[in-house]
Image (cartoon, grey):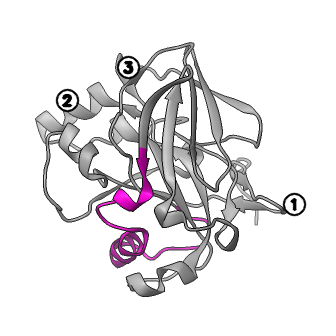
Amino acid sequence: MSYVFQPAPTVGVPVVGRAERFPVRRIYCVGRNYVEHAKEMGFTGREAPFFFLKPGDAAVVVEAGKEATIAYPSLTRDLHHEIELVACIGKGGKNIQAADAKKHIFGYAVGLDMTRRDLQGEMKKQGRPWCIGKGFDQSAPIGPITPAEQAGDIEQAEIWLQVNGKDRQRSNVSKLIWNIGEIIEHVSAAWELQPGDLVYTGTPEGVAAVVAGDTLHGGVAGLTDITVEVRAG
């Protein structure tokens, strides 16, 4: 097959203990999925889960033991960090039941959902889609994927983020409002999941702004940490 120009390369995320890389297809994100984060965003209660997408090429691969850089994005003066556990889909499916979800997960990784909070907020006020606040270039850093069978008790794992060596976010995956299986069930009811899809499962409380020059270091117990520096755009 020929193309009018060369297709963009597939983003490949390293896999712990393997030479092959995980090819990224789509990025699904869950909004307000930790109780305390929902509160800090002005919401309470167990609302129905909702989702937004980022382009697959918004993923920034952070190699093990190395530091990645992302550019401070245009149009914003309020760039926020959101540390997240990422479920990486290895077997596709539609209408997957929560009890069967783990059969579809290849592994887990640490991710960041970077957010242009001021743009997101303005779009919310106007009742418009807020893709501009979430789906921008380099908005989805992700570290190496640990195969599910090597990840330990991921649903009881500590999750944390430091900025310039100081704690910003620290919680536990057990505090998800909708657990990993339930997330997969709801996502797959709306879209048919495919191998290569990434599901960012939500962020705990403590989200805040970063500026150019800041270094973000975060992790989930049992997975490979990530380090990302924000540089001037």
Q: Is residue 87 above or below residue 135?
A: below
Residue 37 in percent (x, y) is at 28, 44
Q: Nearer the viewer, residue 143 or 135?
A: 143
Q: Is residue 3 above or below residue 218?
A: below
Label 1 crowding class (10 Å Cα cut-off): few <14, some 14-19, many 20+? few
Q: Which residue is the site of mark 3?
A: 75
**For the residue marked with disc 3, what is the amino acid?**
Leu
Q: Is residue 181 magenta?
A: yes
Residue at (71, 61) in percent of width and height: 22
Residue at left offset 56%, top offset 52%: 56
Checking the image for residue 122, the label placed there is 2
Q: Disc 2 residue type?
A: Glu
Q: Is residue 206 left or right of residue 180?
A: left
Q: Which residues are magenta?
A: 171-198
Q: To which quarter of the image does residue 66 belong?
A: top right
Residue 129 occupies quadrant:
top left
**How far from the left and from the top, in percent, is residue 70?**
59, 27
